[in-house]
Image: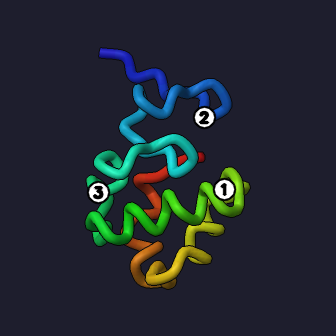
Amino acid sequence: KIHIPLDPEQADARGSGLISINAASAKELEALPGVGAVTAEKIIRYREEHGRFSSKEELKKVPSIGESRYRKMADKITL
């Protein structure tokens, strides 16, 4: 069995199992740890008001997402 890691520059977020904070629906965002319906809507509202996230860390600017909550989801998200 040979394991070939995906090139992160070419990886499709759907194929990698990561959730794109720039494209995910509210339901998809709710799959993240610590994200319920209200927080998912805040992420989408932030995205609509400020445009696409330019970094994963920018997610901490969304109301109610602090460092602790961000750390729980950081390895499960992508742009």
Q: Nearer the viewer, mark 3 or mark 2?
A: 3
Q: Is residue 10 above or below residue 36?
A: above
Quadrant assignment, res 46: bottom right
Precedes in sequence: disc 1 or disc 3: 3
Element marked by disc 3:
loop
Q: Is residue 28 left or right of residue 42?
A: left
Q: Is residue 16 above or below residue 53?
A: above
Colouring convention used in this rendered image of the protein:
rainbow
Which amino acid does the dot numbered 3 rest on?
Answer: Glu
Residue 42 is situated, as x and y percent measured from the top left of the image, at 46, 68
- Local crowd size for mark 3, using a 10 Å CA cut-off: few (<14), some (14–19), many (≥20): some
Precedes in sequence: disc 3 or disc 2: 2
Residue 70 is situated, as x and y percent measured from the top left of the image, at 46, 73
Which amino acid does the dot numbered 1 rest on?
Answer: Phe
Residue 11 is situated, as x and y percent measured from the top left of the image, at 55, 27
Q: Which residue is mark 1?
A: 53
Quadrant assignment, res 40: bottom left
Element marked by disc 2:
loop
Q: Is residue 32 left or right of residue 49?
A: left
Quadrant assignment, res 73: bottom left
Seen at 41% across and 30% down, the residue is 14
Seen at 40% across and 44% down, the residue is 25
Q: Which residue is mark 2?
A: 8
Q: Nearer the viewer, mark 2 or mark 1?
A: 1
Q: Which residue is mark 3?
A: 30
